[in-house]
Amino acid sequence: MKGTWFLALPFVVLAAVPVAHAQLALSANDNKVMLVNGVTKVIANPPSDTVAIIDLGATPPKLVAEVAVPASVVGPPLSVALTPDEGLALVTANQKVDPADPTRQTADNRLSVIDLKASPPAVIATLETGKAPAGLSINRQGTLALVANREEGTVSVFTIQGKTVTPAGKVTVGDAKSGVCHVTIAPDGKLALVSRDGDDRISVLSIDGTKIEYTKRDMNAGIRPYGIDIASNGAFAAVANIGRGQGDNDTISLIDLKANPARVVDTVTVGQTPEGIKVSPDSTLVAVIMMNGSNKPKESPFYSDNGKLVLFRVTGTTLAKVAEAPIGHWSQGVMFSADGKTIVAGNMVEKDLWVFEWNGSILRDTGQRIKVNGGSAALRTAEK
């Protein structure tokens, strides 16, 4: 697809799969920036960012449609979320091209609402968040969304009723430099964890209906906690600590949510820059996307010509590496199919998704590449 042709249409249907009956997965794609030998450059007159709608239940997974939606690679690759019934998608826009200087980006503040059951899928609302919204999550009851505002130190609260998403205030977690990155909600809907890469903390929020409060309880897992995900069984959370990007090996951590109070119980070294992180649907695995130096200049001693998808087994309160595979460059998000047998990794440079199979002991690259319109900046399925 050519960018100019895509801009002339609000969406494009790419396959005859009925969206309403698919196991949906979304890729939010950034068209504003590109990587030039380790340096992020803003593209002149870029085409629209997009969200790709994928049928992850098909064999092999296939692209169903794409919608023009503001998105951004800045922040954890968890900037898109689906309601449990797969009826709505929410997408944050962390950055936009600076109107005063088109060679730079500046903070955005938009949250787009996509009706996934419409024919065709379409943006039905654009709402205002705090400054530079990044990661977001929807509770498993489908009634509440929380958005991390990265340059404001707050979490925006939205209620969901049917197709209507309504702002319901903000919760202050830190100052503007605290780097509030992502917020993940426990399965029972009563607790949320907020990663803060600016001051190396993970904060606990309490949830009672639409009353969201910062409990003043913080945990310390590693340097710059970024992506974070709570297991579907509610027993633990997994955190990606991205470090300072100086070539050192970084870490992921496990938080025991059964402990009172919750606490970090295990931290393991994984390699350079664990960007994306996701717990498998059965709560037995943690998938991690490693940039692995693939985003660095080629002359850097820390450069590598591929990222990595790495799997860790969760046993009680410990993590153990069980498999890894090479992926593309400047890689971002990761997601599982509902049965845990298909794992998808997103790449910014290649503008595609790589599809893997997991049989419980062997991770296999299927060779399937799903092209998307823009660099894949975030991946998500509905959390049920």
Image (tube, rainbow, N blue to C red):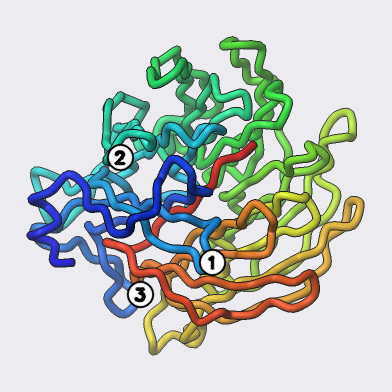
Say which element carries label 1: loop
Is residue 27 or residue 153 the one in the foreground?
A: 27
Q: Residue 43, how many percent across, how many down?
A: 16, 63
Q: Residue 382, how many percent across, how many down?
A: 55, 41
Question: Viewed as shown, does residue 141 lie left or right of 99?
Answer: right
Q: Residue 197, how many percent across, how many down?
A: 55, 46
Residue behind mark 1: 59
User: In which image quadrant can residue 118 be found?
Assistant: top left
Q: Looking at the image, is mark 1 or mark 3 nearer the viewer?
A: 1
Q: Earlier in the sequence, mark 2 or mark 1?
A: 1
Q: Looking at the image, is mark 3 or mark 2 nearer the viewer?
A: 2
Asked if marks 1 and 3 touch (Cβ < 8 Å), the reply is: no
Residue behind mark 3: 350
Three-letter code, disc 3: Glu
Is residue 277 or residue 233 the one in the foreground?
A: 233
Say which element carries label 2: loop
Q: Residue 25, how many percent across, how many down?
A: 48, 51
Residue behind mark 2: 121
Task: Say if 205 sits above or below 243 in the image.
Answer: above
Question: Viewed as shown, does residue 264 lie left or right of 292?
Answer: right
Question: Viewed as shown, does residue 34 lie left or right of 44?
Answer: right
